[in-house]
Image: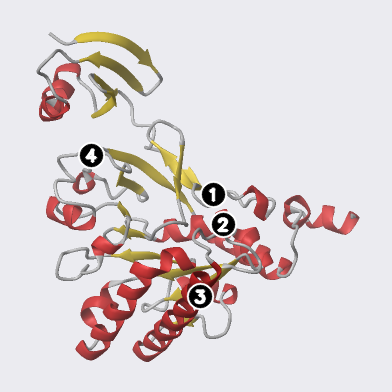
Amino acid sequence: MPRLVKVATTPYWDRLVVRMEVGQELEQFRQAAEKLRGAFGARRIAVREIEPAQVGIDLMRRDPLIESVPATPIPAVTAHIDWRAVPVGVDEFESPYCVSILGGHTSIAGSTGAGKAGLQWNVLRGIAPAIVDGTVRLVGIDPKAKELRRARALFEEGDYAVTESEVVDLLIRLVVEMGLTNERDASSGERDFVPSTTRPLTLILIDELAPLLKYWSRSTRSKIEDLLGLLLTQGRAAGYIIVGAIQEPTKDVFTVRDLFTRRIALRLPTESHTEAALIEDAVQYGALCHQVSETQPGVLFSLEDGARSTVRARLGHVTDADIDELIEYVTTAQGSNVVDLDSHRRPDVARAA
């Protein structure tokens, strides 16, 4: 029998560490996960490898994600931003759930009302000082002309597109800019991109990928897919990063899925949608998007880097007031390198100063 090495408990979890016997493998524990969950009477089970020959078996007794999570707070200054770990929510072990906006592109899939926009708004709140001082340049592609339109004031003229022709023209311009940037980097020998005011990160937010890839005219879709392919394959090193949302992540719609290095999935109708959004066998690895309740918008699953196991988390709930705060913060402080959040949020303090 495998040996129980350690037990730890929290208000929500019993966390077991088990040493496998010779001849046992992690996959056997994964295949037995539902039987173990039932035997222990747990709401959820997560099986992971801790180190060679040691397995972590986490048994949830109460769901820590049942309550909504507050929106990401706006940092005081750009220097406080960790570009590879921007907090956007909380995971089921009560740790910050973060995403990287360097080194690769991120997709988020989910049914209507699942909370996809929460990723974009929390990212924007988490990097707001960098938008103010010019370390980040925002580009918005908003075919529904709804979600990102509220933040229209955050985009420079020409960096926000809605119609087919506008999107194609914008993508062409971005690809040309990216090519020139890559040429300059090749001649200078620069390899690693680090955002700065002299070399800003171009963050491209696409509110809905489906029209671009499936529902617009065939000739337009063909151009867009080619242009997106160039940005997704060459943009990382040049600092052109895409965060894209999609409602219908099936293979015939989400044709560029494999070019997104980081994938997140919220509530989806079927197991096949989950695997189309993340990776084949994602359900087997614990991504149970088809079981997420409609009463829990923002609950997500993502795959751990380099591991066949999933992270379950909940995005911060961004209210209209949170969006208004973000827009007011950026527009009133535009051009300032240092922003006093307390003075900004409390007019009486600002007047006293």
Residue contact at pointers 2 and 4, CB within 8 angstroms: no
- Give me the C-alpha separation between circle 4 and circle 3: 36 Å
Residue 72 - label: 1
Question: How far from the left and from the top, in percent, is residue 264?
Answer: 32, 52
- Residue 329 location, quadrant: bottom right
Report if residue 6 is visible in the image: yes
Query: Which secondary structure lies at badge 3?
Result: helix
The residue singled out by tag 2 in the image is: 125
Labels 3 and 2: the sequence-earlier one: 2
Q: Is residue 41 above or below residue 105?
A: above
Mark 1, other Cα within 10 Å: few <14 / some 14–19 / many ≥20: many
Residue contact at pointers 3 and 1, CB within 8 angstroms: no
Image quarter hosting the N terminus: top left
The residue singled out by tag 3 in the image is: 181
The residue singled out by tag 4 in the image is: 308
- Residue at 42%, 75% in the rendered image: 146
Mark 2, other Cα within 10 Å: few <14 / some 14–19 / many ≥20: many
Residue furthest to the right: 352
- Give me the C-alpha separation between circle 2 and circle 1: 6 Å
- Give me the C-alpha separation between circle 3 and circle 1: 32 Å
Mark 4 vs mark 1: give the one in front: 4
